[in-house]
């Protein structure tokens, strides 16, 4: 099989692959470093051909276009996901019947393990097996007051957990549309102090001092103004945030391209912040929240972006993360409270309509803890102004 179409597809999607990088990949394949595995080839080729994490999404698109029909050795887990590889229109979702009881997390996990051991074929529309539609608590596109989503899209907003490997796309840095407006709003965070050696001529003070000195020129130098603002940007990725990806990327591009911050760092999370933040969601690379507190001091401004919309278990219950494999002793609201206590200036930007905030329990609880603003140019401007003036919520008990 020739790989030249893969090279041309990468270049067509603006992934700058040079001749030397391509030859390095060919040499690696000659040495069988991919072990004749398409999965290994994916990681090998990406490590050799892609120079920036911002290009991972374009690389994934090219890889999918060129290799999506190639056969892979399937495990049972992949076979199950293939059964569930069916997307239902939202109008086809069943209505939630009366009388169905919510299940707690321990009971859900136990029943899921039982179904995985018993199920031998795909099922759709039922109330017991893992499948699509129906009222089973396992699968996707169905109706149940609690459950574990496996495969398929989110959207029902009632799944307690997702029992699959979730690879979320990080936000790109190169969005141009609206980026200039976002950059203008972020510039309002500037805190100018005179720092360093006195190398900048102050003309007004020089004239004033010269006049007082009977006309003898007296040059007055001062240290230059430098912005002392520091910013942490925490972004919700995947699931119900996918429709807002373009808006998120515009803001991220603006923050990433801004040169007026003394320090800037960004992290990712999904739905709620727990005991770690992600530096790369695709590679599951993370940093403990306690280490973030140690590395980034209290003076940092913190902007959190997310819809704050999740199953109440995710916010109020220990081990409530939608990630099936993540365990944490404290509920999500307590980690948010720790974040708010550590940093004096924290705001939350929400893409959901403000009319919806008070009607959803998790949005309402978070907005009572952290000052919340719409994810818009005006919303960001208001948030930045309040960060500068200190007119933001202090830590108070959640009602």
Image (cartoon, grey):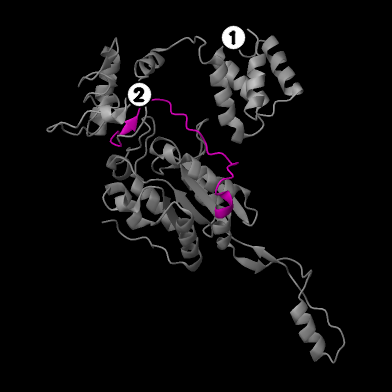
Quadrant of the rendering where the C terminus is positioned: bottom left
Tell me if residue 179 is in the magenta stretch.
Answer: yes
Tell which residue pokes out farthest to the top in this image: 1
Position of 293 relative to 108 (above/below): below
Q: Nearer the viewer, mark 1 or mark 2?
A: 2
Q: Residue at x 54, y 46 (%)?
A: 250
- Of the pair 360 and 320, the residue shown nearer to us: 360
Q: CA distance from mark 1 to mark 2?
A: 32 Å
Position of 377 relative to 330 (above/below): below
Q: Which residue is mark 2?
A: 87
Mark closest to the chain's N terminus, 1 or 2: 1
For mark 1, give the secondary structure.
loop
Q: Position of residue 214 (x, y in %)?
A: 85, 92
Q: Which residue is mark 1?
A: 36
For mark 2, give the secondary structure.
loop
Position of 281 relative to 356 (above/below): above
Q: Residue at x 67, y 14 (%)?
A: 4
- Count residues near mark 1 (Cα–Cα under 10 Å), then give few for <14, some for 14-19, many for 20+: few
Asked which quadrant contains residue 15, the reply is top right
Can residue 344 be seen in this snapshot? no
Q: Residue at x 26, y 27 (%)?
A: 92
Position of 234 with respect to 158 (left or right) is: right
Q: Position of residue 107 (x, y in %)?
A: 23, 28
Span colored in magenta = 157-181
- Of the pair 94 and 110, the residue shown nearer to us: 94
Majority SS type along the magenta span: loop
Position of 352 with respect to 170 (left or right) is: left
């Amino acid at each position: 099989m020739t790989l030249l179409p893969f090279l041309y597809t990468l270049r067509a999607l603006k992934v700058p692959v040079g001749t030397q990088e391509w030859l390095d990949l060919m040499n690696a394949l000659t040495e069988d470093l991919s072990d004749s595995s398409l999965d290994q080839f994916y990681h090998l080729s990406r490590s050799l051909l892609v120079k920036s994490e911002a290009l991972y999404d374009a690389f994934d698109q090219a890889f999918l276009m060129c290799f999506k029909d190639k056969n892979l050795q399937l495990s049972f887990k992949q076979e199950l996901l293939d059964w569930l590889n069916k997307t239902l229109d939202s109008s086809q979702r069943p209505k939630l019947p009366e009388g169905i009881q919510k299940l707690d997390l321990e009971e859900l996990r136990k029943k899921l393990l039982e179904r995985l051991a018993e199920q031998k074929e795909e099922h759709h529309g039922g109330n017991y097996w893992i499948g699509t539609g129906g009222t089973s608590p396992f699968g996707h596109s169905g109706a149940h007051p609690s459950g574990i989503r496996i495969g398929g899209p989110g959207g029902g907003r009632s799944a307690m957990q997702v029992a699959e490997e979730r690879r979320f796309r990080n936000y790109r840095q190169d969005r141009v549309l609206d980026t200039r407006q976002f950059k203008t709003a972020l510039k309002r965070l500037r805190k100018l102090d005179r720092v360093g050696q006195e190398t900048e001529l102050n003309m007004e003070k020089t004239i004033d001092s010269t006049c007082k000195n009977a006309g003898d020129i007296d040059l007055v130098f001062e240290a230059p103004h430098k912005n002392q603002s520091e910013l942490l940007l925490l972004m919700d990725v995947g699931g119900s945030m996918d429709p807002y990806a373009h808006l998120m990327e515009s803001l991220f591009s603006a923050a990433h391209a801004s040169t007026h911050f003394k320090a800037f760092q960004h992290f990712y999370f999904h739905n709620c912040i727990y005991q770690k933040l992600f530096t790369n969601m695709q590679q599951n690379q993370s940093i403990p929240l306690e280490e973030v507190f140690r590395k980034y001091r209290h003076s940092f401004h913190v902007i959190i972006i997310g819809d704050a919309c999740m199953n109440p278990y995710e916010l109020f219950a220990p081990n409530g993360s939608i990630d099936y494999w993540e365990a944490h002793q404290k509920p999500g609201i307590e980690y948010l409270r720790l974040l708010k206590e550590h940093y004096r200036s924290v705001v939350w930007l929400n893409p959901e309509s403000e009319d919806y905030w008070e009607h959803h329990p998790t949005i309402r609880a978070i907005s009572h803890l952290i000052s919340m603003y719409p994810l818009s140019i005006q919303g960001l401007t208001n948030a930045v102004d309040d960060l500068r003036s200190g007119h933001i919520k202090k830590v108070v008990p959640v009602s």
